[in-house]
Amino acid sequence: MKERHYLVTGASSGIGLAVVEGLLGEGAEVTAIARRSTESARLNGESIRSRLTGIRCDLANFSELETVMKEWLGSRIDLDGAVFCHGYGDFGNFEEFSVERIVNLVNTNLLSHMLVARHIIPHLKRRRNGDLVFIGSESGVRGGKMGAVYSATKYAINGFAESLRAEGTSSNLRVSVINPGAVDSRFFDNLDFCPGDARENYIDPDDVSQMVSTVLKMPRGTVIDKVNLTPQKKVLRKK
Ligand SMILES: NC(=O)c1ccc[n+]([C@@H]2O[C@H](COP(=O)([O-])OP(=O)(O)OC[C@H]3O[C@@H](n4cnc5c(N)ncnc54)[C@H](OP(=O)(O)O)[C@@H]3O)[C@@H](O)[C@H]2O)c1
């Protein structure tokens, strides 16, 4: 990963933070985006910190997103790819969702991904080399009760990625989606359920990070287009 440079969104916690730690640990340079800063004990060494640039941005605020992407990409000509990890869950019977809840979830989990990708893709196509990795969800493979809007955003991410992959083939752009089941992260902080306590009921964020690394390290010419990661058991508990 040395001399590679990746953009990671959702970099302040959970999967995104683990991906940042993993990529930096393998020698890459990382630009990390989230509303909060990217902090962890594993990011303390000077040689690691010198390869990390943090950008604070609310990606659901599209004018902020546009400004940040234009300013940042304008100064970078060496980007090798991006890992899209930002997003949140909102669950309940569909008819209980206000317009605002639907719009916020779609803007964050889907449209902001498209808008960030829109800035990066021309750059990667010009370099005729690059990787986009999206964190989807098992809800993007199978719909379930209480998850209509969330599931719709994740199915859309899978479809979006599939089309980008087809469009990018001639420019050596590789596009991958990782669809995890329950991951032990802050994702569940504002939800009324979480994975059961036993280790078999959740995936560790580092496991997802390891899969991202595997995807990015595939030899050129080979694409891991989709990976479904699931905990061995799927017990959820009410809080
Ligand atoms: N945890 C699971 O069980 C699970 C399972 C399948 C898929 N996923 C997906 O994995 C992704 C990451 O989730 P996670 O488990 O790592 O949850 P997490 O720990 O809550 O992390 C979510 C990240 O997204 C960022 N984010 C959210 N809204 C944002 C916004 N408007 N602008 C910029 N950054 C924003 C958060 O940063 P700030 O709050 O600092 O902005 C945070 O860094 C999500 O897309 C989620 O749908 C999660």
Image: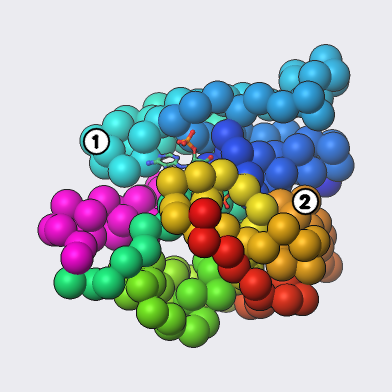
Compared across the picture, whether 159 is left or right of 22 comes to left
Q: Quadrant of residue 230?
A: bottom right
Viewer can see residue 225: no
| Apparent side of residue 149 relative to residue 57 in the rendered image (left or right) | left
Residue 104 in view, yes or no: yes
Q: Which residues are magenta?
A: 96-120
The percent position of residue 73, horizontal first and vertical second, equals 47, 35
From what the image shows, is residue 93 above or below residue 32? Answer: below
* Above or below 178: residue 77: above
Q: Based on the displayed image, in which of its 4 quarters is residue 99 positioned?
A: bottom left
Q: Residue at x 78, y 68 (%)?
A: 200
The type of residue carrying mark 1 is Ser
Q: Is residue 235 magenta?
A: no
Residue 206: assigned label: 2
At 36% from the left and 63% from the top, the residue drawn is: 91
Residue located 73% across and 76% down the image: 233
Q: Is residue 81 left or right of residue 71?
A: right
Q: Which residue is mark 1?
A: 63
Badge 2 amino acid: Asp
Mark 1 residue element:
helix
